[in-house]
Each structure stands twice: as structure tokens, then as C-alpha cells.
Amino acid sequence: MRATRIVGASVAVIALFLMGVHYVCDYLAIDSCVDLGGAWDYTASQCKHDSIPRTAMPYVARYPWLVAGTIVATVFGIVLGLRTHSPSDVA
């Protein structure tokens, strides 16, 4: 039972950590582009130095499968970690 909780907590923490790292890297790329006078093209994930105005796009709109996968993995990890054994599991 203890191992199940450790695995569940690990799955949740690792999923959240990986998405957090991706979010920070994405944020820093956009920030450095804007600091250099460019405009971030959210559809191409590139810094553009032309005069075409770009509209901002939320993180969840750019990476919906990453966000959904992280939510599923986190919920799975929490459920796995909180799972209790039934009396029939006790030998």
C-alpha cells in the first residue's frame, strides 16, 4: 500500500514538474523575443521581427494535449496515491 502511494505521488509530481518546466521555457522564449523588439508568432512558435501585429494566445490553447495529459496524469497519480485496499486484499 505504501508503494502505491509513493508511485501515485511520483506520477502526479513528475507530470506537474514537466509541464511547469515546459511552461517556463516557453515563457522565457516569448519574453526574450519581446525584449529584443520582436513579436512572438504563437502559431509557428517563432520570434518574428516584421511589422505584422500578432495576437496573444493562451498556453492552454497552444498546447491543449499537454495540459490535458498533465491533468489526467495528475488525477491518476492522486487517485492511485489515495487508493485504499479493500478488506479482501488483506491476506
Image (cartoon, grey):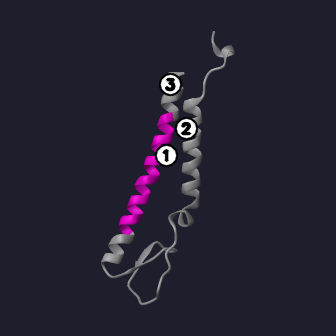
Q: Which residue, given by chain and number where applicable, does mark 2 sit on? A: 77
Q: Give the residue furthest to the top.
A: 91
Mark positioned earlier in the residue sequence (1 or 3): 3
User: In terms of image quadrants, where is residue 68?
Assistant: bottom right
Mark positioned earlier in the residue sequence (1 or 2): 1
Density class for disc 2 (Cα within 10 Å; few <14, some 14-19, many ≥20) is: many
**Residue shown at the point (59%, 39%) measured from the top left:** 76
Q: Provide residue 39's location: percent of width, then percent of height.
A: 41, 80
Nearer the observer, 46 or 87: 87
Q: Which residue, given by chain and number where applicable, does mark 3 sit on? A: 3
Density class for disc 1 (Cα within 10 Å; few <14, some 14-19, many ≥20) is: many
Relative placement, left or right, of 90 versus 26 is right
- Main SS category, magenta section: helix
The segment highlighted magenta reads 9-29
Alpha carbon distance from label 1 to label 2: 9 Å
Looking at the rendered structure, the kind of residue marked 2 is Gly
| Figure quadrant of the N terminus | top right
